[in-house]
Amino acid sequence: GAGVSQSPSNKVTEKGKDVELRCDPISGHTALYWYRQSLGQGLEFLIYFQGNSAPDKSGLPSDRFSAERTGGSVSTLTIQRTQQEDSAVYLCASSSRDWDNSPLHFGNGTRLTVT
Amino acid sequence: LAKTTQPISMDSYEGQEVNITCSHNNIATNDYITWYQQFPSQGPRFIIQGYKTKVTNEVASLFIPADRKSSTLSLPRVSLSDTAVYYCLVGDILYNQGGKLIFGQGTELSVKP
């Protein structure tokens, strides 16, 4: 079946512009995660959704970052007034949270470059 | 939240067995241990998951001692295509401790001919 889909795969934007990154999780997966990965670095946790709600937004790097999820499916990560330090790969993952402790299924990410 | 510690990098040769150990001293009762593999320009991919003792699947084995404060991913007879970054993740997906699943820095495995 289809995996986690992220769009766009690449995004180049000018400093100060807003960007929206989209994640389509695996159908039926109730949990959705956003991570950020800078070049050569590990995965930085940003935010988690269970259904449409995000219990903890403290992982978001600043108030320029926001995320929403509608209909328990698609999620959008929005970065306002982008800065060069926002350049990174933004990864989305989903899981079913079944009793057997379903692992995360990742998309291939959106590579964001802020010039 | 359980913090994990792994070696930054490891080198191996084709055909050898590779063992990567992850330390997680403050693992909680409800936490599972999951290992992921990441190739360049791709998202991480699930390898294996366990709670205690030993788990084996078609690609790897996972050894977890009784105290669960560490775990070892074992890759039998590695090939060049196993060159990747390997992440150990400790967390409670099922009972959702805030949903924060924190990855460690990962181990960069380089397999040489």
Image (cartoon, rainbow, N blue to C red):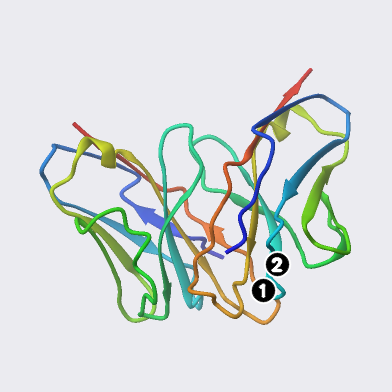
Q: Does residue B25 lie above or below B17 as drawn? A: below
Question: Mark 2 belongs to which amino acid?
Answer: Tyr
- Seen as rendered, the residue at the extreme front is B26
Q: Please give the label number shown on residue B32.
A: 2
Q: Secondary structure at mark 1?
A: loop
* Residue found 57% across the figure and 64% down from its top: B1
Q: Chain under label 1?
A: A
Dot in front, 2 or 1: 2
Q: Is residue B36 left or right of residue A74?
A: right
Pinpoint residue B42: horizontal percent, then vertical percent. Answer: 51, 42
Q: Quadrant of residue B46?
A: bottom right
Pinpoint residue A23: horizontal percent, then vertical percent. Answer: 37, 61
Q: Residues within 10 Å of mark 2 (few under 14, many from 20)?
A: many
Q: Nearer the viewer, residue A104 or B63?
A: B63
Question: Mark 1 belongs to which amino acid?
Answer: Asn
* Residue found 51% across the figure and 63% down from its top: A2
